Image: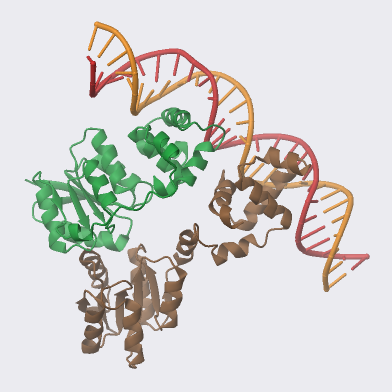
Chain colours: A green, B brown, C red, D orange
Amino acid sequence: MLYKVIIADDHPVFRTGIREVVSNIAGVELCGEAGDGLEAYQLILSTLPDIAVLDLDMPKLTGIDVCEKVLNEKHNTRFIILTMHKDRHFFDDAMHKGAMGYLLKDSAVDELVSCIKEVGSGKKYVSPTIENYLTEYTASEHFPESVKALYNTLTPTEKIIVKLVSQSITTQEIADNLFVSKNTIENHRANIARKLKIEGKNSLLKFALLYKKLL
Amino acid sequence: MLYKVIIADDHPVFRTGIREVVSNIAGVELCGEAGDGLEAYQLILSTLPDIAVLDLDMPKLTGIDVCEKVLNEKHNTRFIILTMHKDRHFFDDAMHKGAMGYLLKDSAVDELVSCIKEVGSGKKYVSPTIENYLTEYTASEHFPESVKALYNTLTPTEKIIVKLVSQSITTQEIADNLFVSKNTIENHRANIARKLKIEGKNSLLKFALLYKKLL
DNA sequence: AACAATATAGTGGTTAACCACTATTGTCCT
DNA sequence: AGGACAATAGTGGTTAACCACTATATTGTT
């Protein structure tokens, strides 16, 4: 059994490290690399790997975003999330969105190898050291409950779009990257605006920038 | 000329990446690795390398601590500090303590190579992208010096306009409120954009929202 | 007197976002 | 089988922001 694996991390040197480790595992074929979340998403669609090893914090889309979106589309790729966050919130979020592996970035090389093998054979794998580091989730600061409630009525696709808007990515670019029509994204934007009860030019951009850190 | 280099990082996978990059540079001999600051210090004393590539955040001693301590003892090793910190304070501290190279962890592989070559030949090397990252980091909390300098080249009228833009007031509304023509405000906006070195649709809005609290 | 900076105002054009619709497909739930 | 929802895609139109110019009056400085 040969597993197709792709990796994604926005830190080139760290990605070199992952590449070195992954490509030396027997039974694994490294079939692609990405430097941000959108690239990773496209790479997964085009190569349909068995396993995707994704950094959590990447530009444009997080590893968890990518995981969620791909699994939503009923693909069979299994996800391993790498992160330096010792925050329980991220761990819970990743597992809830369907990740099969969760590793801290200071994990040993052997752990990454074990994780890929375990996840490859269909099992879940969580860094043994993670329990020690899990701390209370203290994040969601200035997200007013009312706004939060509205935001949570958005569908996964709509949330992705808000996120991309917050990174100054235009409707056309979003459309290109998600392989859908510009009209579709405009439709989503209109639905989002309606749900969030906002109106006027750039109102979605303003919302997205305002709550950027909390999305 | 063959440079002896040691590397130190507490993240095994990242260290694998550094090892891969460093050991493939012609004229460089990788002669040791360490996983924390104390190990790095001992390794430097025992191998007396030409260059030490040190992570800033390591257990026991930081990369800067090691740099300071070794240089205090009049050794000839030159130091390159790797970090994910986008905070000017760390950069200033490292340079003050005698580091010859300073690289962000999301630098390209080529940058690490250039850095080692430059530092090897006695020059200093600072990541060209570091200014951008300093700007990005300080966005929410502080007013980066570089941006502040640009902002202060604006005339009083221009500053007023930036402020009004940050409050979601349109060009037409600003014109009405200041009893001047819409064209005048558009002209001011163009001048502001030029002075702040920004371009593209909504870029002024984005700038204004980003620095809203500090204007 | 010459110059630079500032504020004013204009023309003419491009583009991205938004608005208001309609419409089809597929899934999930009852 | 029917209904709700989600995602897809389209047409046609409006508007705000931006871009690239030119131009004039005022003020302050060298």
Tell whether A199 sits left or right of A178: right
Name the residue located 25 percent from the left edge and 79 percent from the top edge. Answer: B6
Relative depth, front residue between D8 and B64:
B64
Name the residue located 69 percent from the left edge and 38 percent from the top edge. Answer: B173
Q: Position of residue B70 (x, y in %)?
A: 32, 88
Q: Quadrant of the N terminus of chain B?
A: bottom left
Tell me if residue A77 comes above or below residue A27 in the rendering.
Answer: above
Q: Please identify the quarter of the rendering in which residue A184 is found.
A: top left
- The single residue placed furthest to the bottom in the displayed view is B74
Q: Quadrant of the C terminus of chain B?
A: bottom right
Q: Position of residue B12 (x, y in %)?
A: 20, 66
Tell me if residue B11 comes above or below residue C10 in the rendering.
Answer: below
Tell me if residue C8 comes above or below residue B138 in the rendering.
Answer: above
Q: Position of residue A86 (x, y in %)?
A: 27, 58
Relative depth, front residue between A91 and C18:
A91
Tell whether B144 sits left or right of D1: right
Residue A74 in sight in this render: yes
Relative depth, front residue between B134 and A45:
B134
Tell me if residue A42 comes above or below residue A106 in the rendering.
Answer: above
Q: Position of residue B213 (x, y in %)?
A: 57, 54
Name the residue located 34 percent from the left edge and 71 percent from the top edge. Answer: B82
